[in-house]
Each structure stands twice: as structure tokens, then as C-alpha cells.
Amino acid sequence: MKAGEPRIDFDTDWTYSPAPESKDHIGLKDRYDLFINGEFQPPKNGRYFDTINPATEQKLSEVPETTQADVDAAVLAAREAYEAGWSRMAPSTRGKYIYRIARLLQERAREFAVIESMDGGKPIRESRDVDIPLAAAHFFYYAGWADKLEYAFPGRRVRPMGVAGQIIPWNFPILMAAWKIAPALATGNTVVLKSAETTPLTAMKLAEIIQEADLPPGVVNIITGGARTGQMIVNHPDVDKIAFTGSTEVGKYIQRTLAGTGKACTLELGGKAANIVFEDSAIDQAVEGIVNGIFFNQGHVCCAGSRLYVQEGVAHEIIQKLKDRIATLIVGDPLDKNTDIGAINSKPQLEKIQTYVKIGVDEGGTLYQPRCDLPEKGYWHPPTLFTNVSQSHRIVQEEIFGPVLPIQTFRTADEAIEKANNTPYGLSGGVWTDKGSKIFKITKEIRAGVIWANTFNKFDPSSPFGGYKESGMGREGGVPGLLPYVVLV
Amino acid sequence: MGKRLDIRKTYKLYIDGKFPRTESGRYYKWTDPKGGQVLNICRGSRKDFRDAVVAARRAFAPWEGRTAYNRGQIIYRIAEMLEGRRDQFEVELTLQGATRKEARREVENTIDRLIYYAGWADKYQQVFSSVNPVAMPYFDFTVHEATGVVAVIAPETSSLWGLVSLLAPVVVGGNTCVVLASNSHPLCAITFAEVLQTSDLSPGVVNMITGMRSELLEHFASHMDVNAIVYCGENADEIKMVGEKSSLNVKRVVTLTDSGWNRKTAQGPYHILKTQEIKTTWHPVGI
């Protein structure tokens, strides 16, 4: 589209009727307890904290503030379960338990999807179609590996590491729990998992499933809490391995803390993915991909396409189409099936995003936000674009973790690659072009662990995920996802 | 004419395909434990190391970009060059305290290890890469790639076989590196650099620094443009410090012990994988 050409008129009298997913099917208790040694038990100090619905600011339930004594009990239970038999159990039996978890999760998919959206603020469309099916798929995938490990590592045998301490983030609670627990169990480890402070509920529901599946007590222990509880796990002397997904800052703390202890660690940390659009790409598909890349899950995605690079010849057209497209995005009730962008996960996160938007403006970026009626209650942020930014702008360099997209242009492929790689992160990247040979050139040159060509934000349990450089170490998913949980002998 | 006066070798650093003395002008005295021959060894500085990292970074893309076949050929060429200079290494190893027989075995084992890894250059991707059966209409494959610039802290006692056992899997996988040679057994490292220099290896792919481990180790671990560190040793304080400094830029840390170089597991493709990243690429399938 050239300047001056008539634009599509998106104004219409038609509006979507509300299409909320019903909440009456779900079972949510007023209070959850720690899941230790196969039983729900109250925290030693009796203290709980609220978990709220970020779309309404209403309390959903409360979960324990885990103390050192609770962490000790969870690690002890995991150690005893490990020694008592999980590590020596017939691998095919281990696999069967994991299959059970997968099936139970499928059976209760709708309940999980609704709770995930209520606790985290993500659109029901995403929790229903992405989070829950993928979480179940991870259990299925790794269940099948349990009795086939001799095929995973040619020339070597493996043994489990022992007790795995696992710390998951708030953006994909049940999916991250599945990513962590499934490969750990398949390889014969036992687990102490800490859910995120703001989104603990589906992990507690997963504990119910683990109980239902009759998993031997202590094989999986699930605790709740914030950064301090995480520290207790990282520092616990009887934990053999740490698996962490979260910020690069905390990842560095964990690596520093574990130095010299002999404990293994996998880190899935932050990102600032370049999404590169060439002028020979299918423009409309690219625009959809850009939207999916940055606005999926409100932009609370470590691998989000959070830096857009558009080739100069099509920059005007793409930016215009992008503005038109985001004007049609529906921001609002996460439980409504029409919602595209749900609630920001927490108040601090909303404030962080707002701070970055302000920084973007203060540093000279040009802000674009569509007209957007945001609900009065809850934490909301409109989809946001920035043009007139350069590599040195903070919103280009730093991870925002929200629906904010800085846009830059480039002329040559080499320039695009150089700009894409100009970051300490290396988690993901995207490229849009109709030319196959160009795809292979660009995907090879981008220094990142996952590259999407002519698509974005796709995940699958058979497909390894993880970062280069400061985006972490180790992979989750696929055969490489088994490696961090075994010792080669 | 009396007895011929022998020519003594000046041991220098190896940076970017050249053999400079240390920019600091410092040295340390090295004494042959038996004969008492005294040599001056370059006491490399932090600046030497940083120069070497710049060279290694510059060399990385071209080295990684070579075909796997070509990398294998060059590693094989290193073995050929070493084979041709066996005597020199045997002399140096005996100077460093080995018996003649031990020295001969060590040189032979080193050559064989290089040949072993040369053969992996164009095979490990085939064994460990995958096409992933994703549950969507996408073509999705996973390959290994070099992690970048690797700092290699050489074994203190196994100055040739151990050194090459660390170095070969790093380089065969497409990484470039800066090696901190053994403090107490530095001779083989520099002479091995001469072998590398005549083996078609591009400048900067391997750089060799001699000096004090106690002084340089923290700089090897804390440099922000180094992607991984392979540490050989058992010193608990050093291991802790390396891990802590490496967290500054999330370096991959590989820790090995300076023993058991003849074990079956001392070589293998998993050593290559330790300094590899794993890249997954997705593309839609359709018409």
C-alpha cells in the first residue's frame, strides 16, 4: 500500500456479544495446602497469601507461604521416594504413571483452562487451545521415553541425578510445570517444584491429579511461595539439580549460588527476539505473525518477538497494516472466548510495562496505541507499538515482558542479522520471506535457540526449546530435554 | 672447533596466528625438574588474554562457517604435523619429568585422539540432530551449533594429551578458543601452537597463553565475550570462583579432572556437545 491510497475502514457498528466461558464447572478451594509426600499439609508457620484474579482484582484462593522447615520436609520426602524405589522402578512402570498424569490432565482440561485464565489473566482461547493440551502432550511425550532411554544416548548408559528442585515462572504455570516434571520423572528423578507467586493454582490442581494417579508419595512435591522459597530450594544441600525458568537476573544468581557445589542446573531465561520481515514476504501473514509474536499471552513470553525489523521497502505498508490490525484486537475479560489480549498478570508487572512505555517516550520513540476501552477493574495494557527507535533505546535492549513492540527498519540481510544478534540474549528469533534459501541463510545466522520462519511462537514436546548466550543453558523438550536430568555413565 | 653450542628456544605466546611476547614484558622462571635447565616463560597478562578473545571472536564465524568435512581435514592435518614432530615433543615431555617411554606413549595417544575427533567433525550432527514429529503442519528440525569463544583451562600435569583432549572437541565443533596453558608444564603448549600454525588452522581459532593460573583464571571466567569455559583441575576454590564469575554472562561451565585420560569415556561425541548450542527451526508446511 502506498502513501495516499485509500485504507480499509475498520469502523463498524458491529460488536461482539459477550461469550464468556462458564465458571460453574471448576473446583476451587478457599485455601490450598502444600503437597508434600503425597499429602496436602499446612505450612509449618500457618501463614498463607492470597492469589487474585488480575482481571477483577478479586481473591480466588490462598496458598501457603512455604518456610524452610516445609522445604526441608519436601526435599526429604523427595529423597526418600528416590531411594525407596522411584529411581529403581521398572522404567515401563514409571512411564505408566506419567501416562496416567497425561490422561487425567486431558480429562480435566476445561477445569484447568478456566482456572489458568482466572489466576493468570490469559485469554481462555489460549489456555484452552495451547497451555493445557501442550502440558498434557509433554507428559505423554516423556512418558514414552521412560523405558527407551538407552536409545536416547548412543554409546552410553544413564542414571538419574536424584532430587530435582524446580522453579517455574508465572506466565505459563501448568505448561512450565509439565515441561519440568515430565522429563524429570521419565528419567527416574524425584521432584520438589515451586509454583510462581502470582499463579499457583493450576500447580495445586496438578498435585490433585498426581494424588489421583497414585504416584508413590514424595515422587512429586509441590510447594508455593515467592523468591525466598525459591532461594531455599536453590540453597538446599540435598537437592542434586536445579531447573529454573524465569528472569536472567535470577538465573545469574542461581548459577553464582550453585558454583562449586557440584549441583547441575538448567536455566531458561529472558529473551528479546528479533522478528525480521523481508519485503518479499507474504505481507498479511507476516502482520498476523508479528501480532502473534508479541501479543500472545499479553507479551508475557520469554521468546516473544519483541523487536521487529522490517525491510525499508515495505516498512510503511507493514506498519500501517499493523496499526490497523491491532485496532481490531479485543482487550478484556480473559474468560471471554473472543478476547485476544487478557489481563496483565499482576500489578507490579503492569507498572513495569508502564515504566518501559514511559522510558520509550522519554527517549524519543514514537508511541502508537489504538483506541481501546479498558475495563475499570483489573490490570490492563493496550497493544503498543514504538517507531523511531534505535538499537541503543532501552525498550529495544531490555526485556519488557508485555504487549510493547519497538519497530526498526533495515536495508540488507546482513544489516538485519547484525542488528538481530546485537543483544546479550539468544532465546528465539523470527524471519519472514518467501525465499527458501534466504530462510536458511537467516535462520543459520541468528544466534538463538529457537527460530521460527514464516510463523512464530509454536511449541511442541518433541521440539527442543532453550537459549544461547544470556538466555540460559540446557534445553527442554525433545531428546535434549532428557539430558539435563541424567548422568552419562 | 669445540662442542657445538645448542640454540635455546624462546617460548612465546600464540595469539591470532602470531607468536608475540607478552605485552606486559613479564616472565616467570621455569626449571626443568631433572636437569635444572632454566627457561623464561612469558607471563601473559589480562591484556594478552583480551587480545586473544578479540582474535578468537573474529575467527569464530569463518571457522564455524567452514564445512564440517573441511574442519575434519584440518584436525587430521594437525595430527599429521604432530606425527612429524614426535621427537621434539618427547624431548619436551622428558624435560617436564616424564620417562622416555611415558613421553612416547603420550605423544602417540595425543595423535590418536586428534585422529579420533577429526572423524567426528562431519558425524556428530548426524547422530544428534533430529527432525521433530510435531503435532502440527510444520517442518521442524534441530541441529547443533558451536557456542562461540571458549576459554580452556588446560590440565596442570597432562600438558599434551590432556590439553589436546580438551582442545579437540571444542575446535572440531566449530568453536574458537583461548587456552591457558599449564603453569608448571608450559613447554608442550607453545610447541603445540607451532604445530597448529602449520596445520591450515586459521589465525585466531586457537590462541595459547602462558602465565600464572592464579592471576589469569578469574579473567578467563569473567570475560563477557567468552561463551563457555572448560576448566580442568580439582581445586575447589578455583572451581567455585570460575562458576561464580561465569554467571556474569551465563557462561557454560565444563569441569574435568586432570586424570584418567586413557579411560574409554575420556573421549567421545558428548565432549563435543558440551560446547554446542542446540538450535530448533520451524517452518509451516503447505502449498
Image: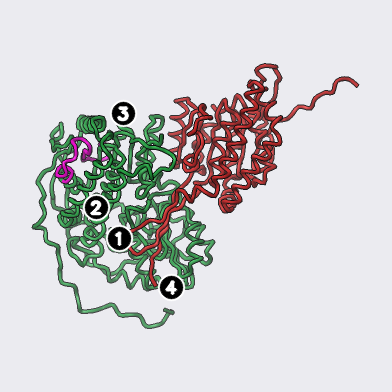
Chain colours: A green, B red
Q: Distance between the residues labelled 2 and 4?
A: 42 Å
Residue A337 in picture, x, y percent from top left: 19, 65
Local secondary structure at mark 2? helix
Q: Distance between the residues labelled 3 and 2?
A: 32 Å
**The magenta stretch spans residue A218:** yes
Considering only order in the chain, which callout, 1 or 2, is on the residue closer to the N terminus? 2
Q: Is residue A313 left or right of residue A147?
A: right
Please identify, in this view, whether the residue under mark 3 or under mark 2 is nearer the observer.
2
Q: Which chain carries label 3?
A: A
The residue identified by callout 1 is: A296
Q: In this view, does A399 lie to the left or right of A89?
A: right
Labels 1 and 4 positioned on one and the same chain: yes
Residue range in magenta is: A209-229
The residue identified by callout 4 is: A316
Above/below status of A74 relative to A319: above
Q: Which chain carries label 1?
A: A
The residue identified by callout 2 is: A136
The residue identified by callout 3 is: A237
Considering only order in the chain, which callout, 1 or 3, is on the residue closer to the N terminus? 3
User: Is residue A408 among the parts visible in the rendering?
Assistant: yes
Q: How far apart are marks 3 and 1 (CA)?
A: 39 Å
Looking at the image, do the residues carrying marks 1 and 4 touch, with CB atoms under 8 Å apart? Answer: no
Local secondary structure at mark 1? helix
At 52% from the left edge and 46% from the top edge, which residue is drawn? Answer: B148
Outermost residue toward the right in this view: B1
